């Protein structure tokens, strides 16, 4: 599994500077809120912070889950040969199918990561684009990501 933590945390994100200069009463309030979120995640599978940022939660958590699946899957969907130029007869060990399945998972991860980090990337690479053009590009990337995700949705348990 990847060493880099991905996905949403139960804890409120603060910097070291903020924690060092935080009033003791605010620190206790933050700890109580964090404990509440941990409890909600354990009991329901999500916390109230996830509800209010469902888009961010999805774009951080699902790629992390897909990355874990990619690193630990033991098989591939049988229908993957429909998307390959070789047949099952020419891939007896399934090496090409494994490789293709990894490529598909990597593409879904890349697209969702691109949607999530879109604002920073576009501001740095295309500062001349207007807001409408940026939103249209982001919408196009999101549609590609969800199209690919939905196409392979029932195969994500491999």
Image: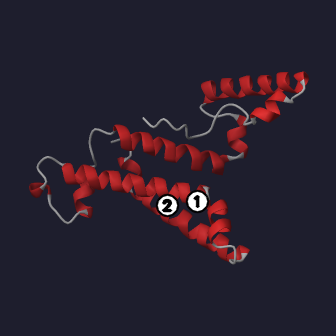
- Residue on which the image places disc 1: 115
Q: CA distance from mark 2 to mark 1?
A: 8 Å
Give the quadrant of the C terminus.
top left
30 to 53, vertically: above or below:
above
Report the label total: 2
Q: What residue is at 72 percent from the left and 73 percent from the top?
A: 131
Residue 82 on image: x %, y %: 24, 62
Residue 97's disc is: none
Residue 3 on image: x %, y %: 48, 35
Residue 145's disc is: 2
Q: Are marks 2 and 1 in contact (CB under 8 Å)?
A: yes
41 and 127: which is toward the camera: 127
Residue 135 visible here: yes
In this image, 143 relative to 132: left or right?
left
Q: Secondary structure at mark 2?
A: helix
Residue 90 on image: x %, y %: 10, 57
């Amino acid at each position: 599994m990847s060493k880099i933590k991905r996905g949403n945390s139960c804890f409120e994100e603060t910097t070291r500077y903020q924690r060092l200069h935080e009033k003791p009463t605010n620190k206790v309030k933050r700890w109580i809120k964090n404990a509440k979120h941990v409890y909600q995640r354990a009991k329901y599978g999500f916390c109230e912070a996830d509800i209010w940022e469902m888009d961010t939660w999805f774009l951080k958590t699902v790629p992390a889950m897909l990355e874990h699946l990619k690193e630990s899957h033991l098989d591939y969907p049988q229908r993957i040969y429909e998307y390959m130029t070789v047949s099952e007869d020419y891939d007896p060990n399934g090496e090409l199918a494994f490789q293709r399945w990894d490529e598909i998972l990597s593409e879904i991860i890349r697209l969702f990561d691109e949607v999530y980090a879109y604002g920073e990337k576009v501001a740095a690479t295309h500062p001349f684009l207007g807001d409408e053009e940026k939103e249209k590009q982001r919408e196009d990337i999101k549609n590609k990501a969800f199209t690919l995700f939905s196409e392979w949705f029932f195969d994500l348990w491999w």
